[in-house]
């Protein structure tokens, strides 16, 4: 395991600065690109809210900072429509900026081999708990390695949740986001769902419920 920890640290040290750079550049690119946004496909009713969801994407030159799954107006359930800042709803310009540049920054690189792990093409193993969640009583740690069957590329991810009060927890996550349960899912209806991105988070006071 120690060898894999060393390899993981090396991978994260190489990818993290580039990931941070993409996020920072997105703060400038997204507001410039939003006036040129495009609507793709017909509207669909939100599954858990009143109103309709549209796939709104940025122009091709801003593809790295767009979101090919949820678009600029958030999730198809309508959660973002109900919870966007200041009650503005998902279709306000500021809400779209916040979704693309702050909440889900530089999202599309997860569909690339550099920043995305295609779980259907990988085998995996893990150390620690199979299920770790930022929910009450569901903490623990997991270190996961996914290996691409054809190329041998390794994708490392570490997730640790330590609940220190009834409503708060320390959450640490580095690397790629696959969970053991992801490898058992059927993605035939939407193969884009198989791509699990690269992330980093250190939150000592995350609210859990």
Image: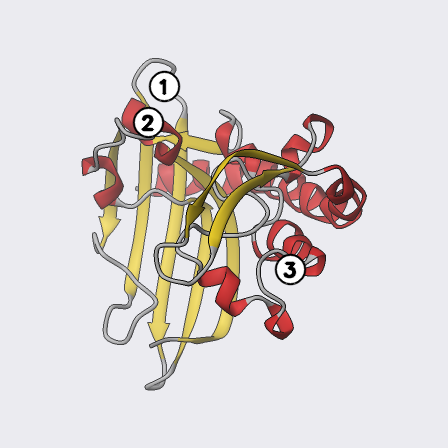
> Which circle marks residue 95 in the picture?
3
Q: Mark 2–mark 1 contact, CB under 8 Å? A: yes
Q: What is the quadrant of the N terminus in the image?
A: top left
Q: Which residue is mark 2?
A: 147
Q: Which residue is mark 1?
A: 152
Frontmost residue, 205 versus 70: 70
Q: Given this view, does label 3 or label 2 mark the residue nearer the observer?
A: 3
Residue at image position (32%, 37%) is 145
Q: Give the side of residue 195 with respect to residue 127, left or right.
A: right
> How far, Cα to Cα, is label 3 from label 2?
37 Å
Q: Residue at x 47, y 52 (%)?
A: 52
In this view, 33 is above or below 85: above
* Tag of residue 107: none
Disc with the residue nearer the chain's start (2 vs 1): 2
The C terminus: image quadrant? bottom left
On the picture, is 44 further left or further right than 25?
Answer: left
Which residue appears at 41% of the width and 32% of the height?
A: 117
Secondary structure at badge 3 equals: helix
């Amino acid at each position: 395991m120690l060898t894999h920890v060393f390899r993981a640290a090396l991978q994260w040290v190489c990818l993290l600065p580039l990931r941070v750079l993409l996020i920072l550049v997105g703060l400038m690119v997204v507001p410039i690109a939003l006036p040129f946004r495009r609507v793709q496909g017909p509207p669909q009713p939100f599954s858990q809210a009143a109103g309709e969801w549209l796939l709104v994407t940025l122009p091709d030159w801003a593809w790295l900072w767009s979101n090919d799954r949820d678009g600029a107006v958030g999730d198809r359930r309508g959660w973002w429509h109900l919870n966007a800042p200041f009650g503005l709803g998902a279709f306000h310009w500021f809400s779209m900026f916040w979704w693309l540049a702050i909440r889900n920054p530089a999202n599309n690189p997860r569909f690339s081999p550099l920043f995305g792990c295609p779980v259907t093409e990988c085998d995996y193993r893990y150390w620690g708990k199979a299920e770790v969640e930022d929910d009450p009583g569901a903490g623990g740690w997991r270190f996961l390695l996914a290996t691409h069957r054809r190329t041998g590329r390794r994708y490392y991810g570490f997730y640790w949740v330590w609940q220190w009060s009834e409503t708060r927890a320390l959450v640490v996550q580095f690397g790629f986001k696959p969970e053991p349960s992801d490898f058992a899912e059927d993605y035939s209806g939407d193969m884009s769902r198989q791509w699990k991105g690269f992330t980093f988070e250190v939150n000592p006071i995350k609210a859990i419920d």
